[in-house]
Image: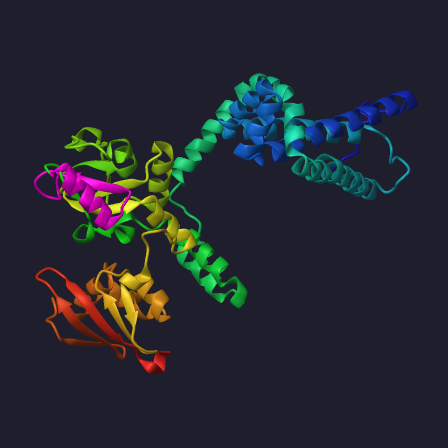
């Protein structure tokens, strides 16, 4: 690179001081912009709410800026780029290193000095400060940033549109860090005995977005529901016997669920005679089997709902799913007043168990201490132990039939026409 011409170099001492002052001012602007990026994009919804409580106008302004993150980022990047270019131009016009020869060495020193100045004072230090004081920093820069956003719209809007176009065009190129690889990484991590619960929660989070409702729902065969024509006394008796807080209501068959009865809605009418309970039944919320749990959780939050009816592609009822079912996929089993593992299994001795056929496979793994990987390939679409045994047998088993799977013996103790009711499991001692 050639030396700047004699007309472009500032040599007057007064002008040199002004030039250095200009560089310091520009570095300050660069620091503000760099800090703005960290401060705003590190704000959580709670942080924004806190700012609103202190200053409603600033809080609403910040929330509005964050609603268009791509435009906001484009504004910050463009402003910072212009400022840094101006710093470099000012710096090279100063004759601060005229005494260094040859010119190549002088150029290298200039590049090193300006790089350190920009990185240290224009990037690193302000970002560290802004990250630690994001609420106050964001409040101070909110109005200037709004002005910049409006002034730079002719540049930031096209930049945002190009970004969106690139995302659409190359959106299918996903990260190679798949769910499977994340799961493998978690398995290889040595958490220690004390942190096994934390590891399970992390695994639940990793797999959460790839799990659909069908895998978690209570199947239709296990749904307790009320007929729309049931009498008041019959309804009260059913509630006392089953203890559920929300009960599906159907007309004709379980495939025609017409509403959900909330037990809390009945409380004012407990002492009534022949109360028309059908009048307070709420509308049901139907979802497809394939909806992912993260999407369903978001819907539950938006609708303030706790129960959904799962339907198949033909509109028939497949099962029901609750908010508790979803949360259990992350944090593990949640015990409430109606949960009782003893209702689903009896441990005979160290290797022998008696299970209800409808117990979930995940509960089976937990209770017996077996490795899920040993069963996963053979489990297929089965969600319950009864479904698993039917699947590995190839057809519906008969009472008394013994099925061997990897040395584990599954003995069918009780069946009805539609499902396995009770299974005795003798674990393979070699795998324990």
**What residue do we see at 52% from left, 33% from top?**
45
Q: In this view, does 294 lie above or below 83?
A: below
Q: Is residue 16 above or below residue 208?
A: above
Residue sitting nearer the eye, 89 or 257: 257
Q: Residue 101: image x %, image y %?
A: 88, 42
Number of callouts: 0
- Say whether residue 323 is left or right of residue 182: left
Residue sitting nearer the eye, 141 or 284: 284
**What residue do we see at 74% from left, 31% from top?**
88
Image quadrant assignment for residue 75? top right
Q: Residue 202: image x %, image y %?
A: 47, 55
Magenta span of residues: 230-256
Image quadrant assignment for residue 3? top right
Image quadrant assignment for residue 398? bottom left
Magenta-colored stretch includes residue 242: yes
**What residue do we see at 22% from left, 60% from top?**
358
Q: Residue 270: image x %, image y %?
A: 24, 35
- Say whether residue 239 is left or right of residue 151: left
- Say whether residue 369 is left or right of residue 117: left
Q: Residue 166: image x %, image y %?
A: 43, 35
Residue sitting nearer the eye, 160 or 64: 64
Q: Is residue 6 visible?
A: no
Q: Is residue 314 above or below residue 71?
A: below
Magenta-colored stretch includes residue 77: no
**What residue do we see at 33% from left, 41% from top?**
296
Identify the coloring. Answer: rainbow
From the image, which quarter does the C terminus lie in? bottom left
Q: Can residue 70 be seen in this view?
A: yes
From the image, which quarter does the N terminus lie in? top right
Q: Is residue 349 above or below residue 10?
A: below
């Amino acid at each position: 690179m050639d030396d700047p011409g004699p007309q472009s170099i500032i040599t007057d001492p007064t002008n040199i001081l002004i030039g250095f002052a200009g560089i310091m001012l520009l570095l300050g602007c660069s620091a503000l912009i760099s800090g703005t990026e960290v401060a705003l994009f590190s704000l959580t919804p709670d942080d924004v709410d806190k700012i609103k409580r202190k200053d409603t106008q600033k809080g609403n302004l910040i929330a509005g800026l964050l609603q268009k993150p791509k435009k906001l980022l484009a504004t910050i990047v463009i402003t910072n780029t212009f400022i840094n270019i101006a710093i470099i131009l000012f710096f090279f016009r100063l004759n601060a290193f005229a005494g260094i020869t040859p010119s190549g060495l002088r150029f290298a020193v200039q590049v090193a000095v300006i790089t350190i100045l920009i990185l240290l004072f224009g990037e690193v230090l302000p970002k560290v400060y802004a990250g630690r004081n994001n609420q106050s920093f964001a409040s101070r820069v909110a109005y200037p940033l709004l002005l910049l956003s409006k002034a730079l719209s002719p540049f930031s809007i096209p930049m945002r549109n190009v970004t969106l176009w690139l995302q659409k065009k190359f959106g299918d190129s996903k990260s190679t860090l798949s769910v499977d690889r994340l799961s493998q990484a978690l398995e290889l991590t040595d958490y220690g005995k004390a942190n096994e619960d934390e590891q399970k929660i992390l695994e639940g989070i990793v797999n959460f977005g790839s799990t659909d409702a069908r895998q978690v729902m209570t199947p239709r065969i296990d749904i307790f529901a009320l007929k729309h024509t049931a009498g008041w006394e019959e309804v009260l008796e059913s509630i006392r016997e089953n203890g559920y807080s929300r009960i599906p209501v159907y007309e004709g068959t379980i495939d025609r669920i017409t509403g959900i009865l909330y037990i809390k809605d009945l409380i004012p009418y407990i002492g009534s005679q022949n109360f028309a309970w059908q009048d307070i039944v709420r509308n049901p919320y139907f979802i497809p089997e394939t909806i992912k749990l993260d999407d369903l959780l978001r819907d539950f939050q938006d609708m303030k709902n706790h129960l959904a009816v799962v339907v198949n592609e033909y509109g028939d009822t497949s099962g029901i799913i609750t908010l508790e079912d979803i949360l259990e996929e992350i944090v593990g089993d949640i015990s409430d007043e109606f949960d009782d593992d003893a209702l689903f299994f009896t441990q005979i001795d160290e290797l022998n168990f008696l299970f209800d056929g409808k117990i979930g496979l995940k509960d089976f793994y937990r209770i017996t201490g077996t490795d899920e990987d040993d069963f996963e390939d053979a489990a297929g679409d089965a969600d319950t132990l009864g479904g698993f045994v039917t699947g590995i047998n190839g057809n519906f088993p008969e009472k008394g039939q013994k099925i061997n799977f990897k040395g584990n013996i599954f003995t069918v103790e009780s069946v009805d026409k539609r499902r396995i009711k009770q299974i005795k499991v003798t674990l393979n001692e070699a795998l324990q």
